[in-house]
Image (tube, rainbow, N blue to C red):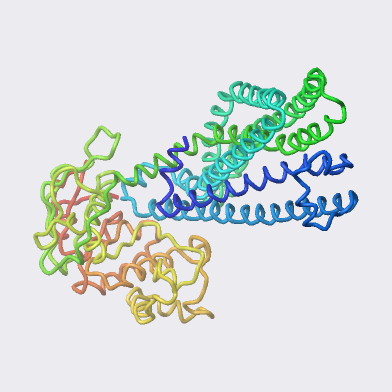
Amino acid sequence: MLNKVWYLLDSEQRSSVIVIACLMLIGMVLETLGLGLVIPVLTIITESDLIGTYPFMLPIFDMLGSPNHEQIVIIAMISLVVVYFIKTLYLAFFAWRQAKYISGVNAELSYRLFSQYLRQPYSFHLQRNSAQLIRNTINFPITIASVIHQSLLIAMEALVLLGISILLINFEPLGAFMVMSLFCLSGCCYSYITRKHMLRWGEESATNEGLRIQHVQQGLGAAKDLKLLGRGNGFIEQYNHHNIRGAHLSKRQTTFDAFPRLMLELFAVAGLASLVIVIVYKGNHIETLLPIIGLFAASAFRLLPSVNRVITAVQYLRFTLPVINTIYDEVRLFEKIKASPSRGMLSFEDNLSLSNVNFNYLNTKSQTLTDINLKVPKGSTIGFIGESGAGKSTLVDIILGLLTPETGKVKVDGVDIETSIRGWQERIGYVPQSIYLTDDTLRRNIAFGLHDEKINENSVLGAVKAAQLDQFVKSLPEGLDTVVGERGVRLSGGQQQRIGIARSLYHDPSVLVLDEATSSLDTDTEREVMDAVRKLHGKKTILIVAHRLSTVEDCDYLYHLKAGKVIDEGAPNLILTQRAVNVE
């Protein structure tokens, strides 16, 4: 388990663990020293003739000016307070240093997961549920950080227990052995009994958390439909089922965490009583009991929370084992998936071609695309038509470099785009059917994903004009600083699509791809959007996936797909008129 957590740490974080381990050793020494002073202090209080009983202390008393008994007691108590003050300051510093390290691990791991998820190929996201990725990115790093905290806590408390045990054995070996054996035996028995329960509950909790996030996502994302249909209660009930289940699992874990403290208190009293019986049985005088009993009582006061924390921490590690396994598997997966090569922007001066391209989605029996061959000259406008499920959008995703064909090649000017996927994608502007708009300004939605200082205002204005958004922007009181609302809820469908076109044109791409970009618009709005696209004819290479045939009438060439195959191709007047194609 811990070897997997260690694997998740980078080299700097591993080095910090060594530093923290050294700080722990110092803390253990201070803890042991604090308890070790109990017997000398109690002896000073109870023994009136210290020099007669302990003649080796005479030089110390002479150095202090031969103080009387009362003065010695005062000096001893002040010394005890000073030692505990130093110990408290150090342990406070150690707690801060440990918290800094743990919170840093949490932030770095969350950042690493999120950045790696966004860098994964598109096919990765097709196979994964976004709720699980959100859970892994936000919730699970907190758990991993807590695991590290609990592991450090176990190490710290184990060192303290070791130091105190050595101290007790030095003064009363048999009694110390009995007390420590009692603590260890009770802890091991409890841990063994609860082991399977914690593992099972941990797996349920991890799964349950993902489902909670999923139901929240789905419910909020479908708020409009649920309001209209009056079916919000179904989503609420689904969420609440997992919410209650999560609370139930948390209740069980919390209850099990409380048991060790109650159990240890009983054993501590029994152990202390056994110690007194052993000392009396050995024939020691009653006055000699006080310092030893005082030491054991003080030790028990410190040992009880330590043993309790160790047992609780072990329980927590078992409960979170599924989380550790999940994040470990994710990080290992990232290492197996190779990043797409990038060798600079690909030259596009002649044509884009697909030769013998075949593709099939994972876990599907029927072939999605079969023997696709086509050529797109630079500056041309090409349309792809066909019924729903014909493979048009999949074909576009392959052209975009989002999906990799099983066989065949996609080439630009004779160069395989796989040699530089990013170099090819930097030449593409993409307008999907549904434009994803963030709850931010028009400017930031057009220059999507860029910080303000990196946004080129001239590029924004040029994209706005090319997408025929300029009049709309002028009508807004705040212009490009207008906030569009989450998913663009404050805009019409046509306005959203124009923003999508403006976004695709911001970086002045060579190729513009419209994937059924107007299928959800009314006829008049579609005409306005397509007018903006037609003005780019000849200036850009345009690929249009059509839902309505009216959007491809002005194309230079059409490809008709059916069941993943190109069944016809030619000029629009030939395909649409003479052969009377109907794909709507």
**Horizontal relation, residue 571 to residue 462: left or right:** left
* Residue name at image x 25 percent, y 46 percent: 391
Closer-to-camera residue (579/75): 75
Is residue 181 among what the camera can see? yes
* Residue name at image x 24 percent, y 34 percent: 366
Q: Is residue 488 above or below residue 236?
A: below
Relative image position of residue 176 (x, y in whole percent): 69, 27
Is residue 570 among what the camera can see? no
> Residue 234 sits in which quadrant?
top right
Relative image position of residue 123 (x, y in whole percent): 31, 46
Q: Is residue 22 above or below residue 53?
A: below
Closer-to-camera residue (45/492): 45
> Residue 276 sits in which quadrant?
top right
- The mark total stands at 0
**Horizontal relation, residue 215 to residue 410: left or right:** right
Q: Is residue 56 above or below residue 460?
A: above
Relative image position of residue 73 (x, y in whole percent): 86, 49
Closer-to-camera residue (67/564): 67
Closer-to-camera residue (466/189): 189
Relative image position of residue 40 (x, y in whole percent): 78, 42
Q: Is residue 389 above or below residue 469?
A: above
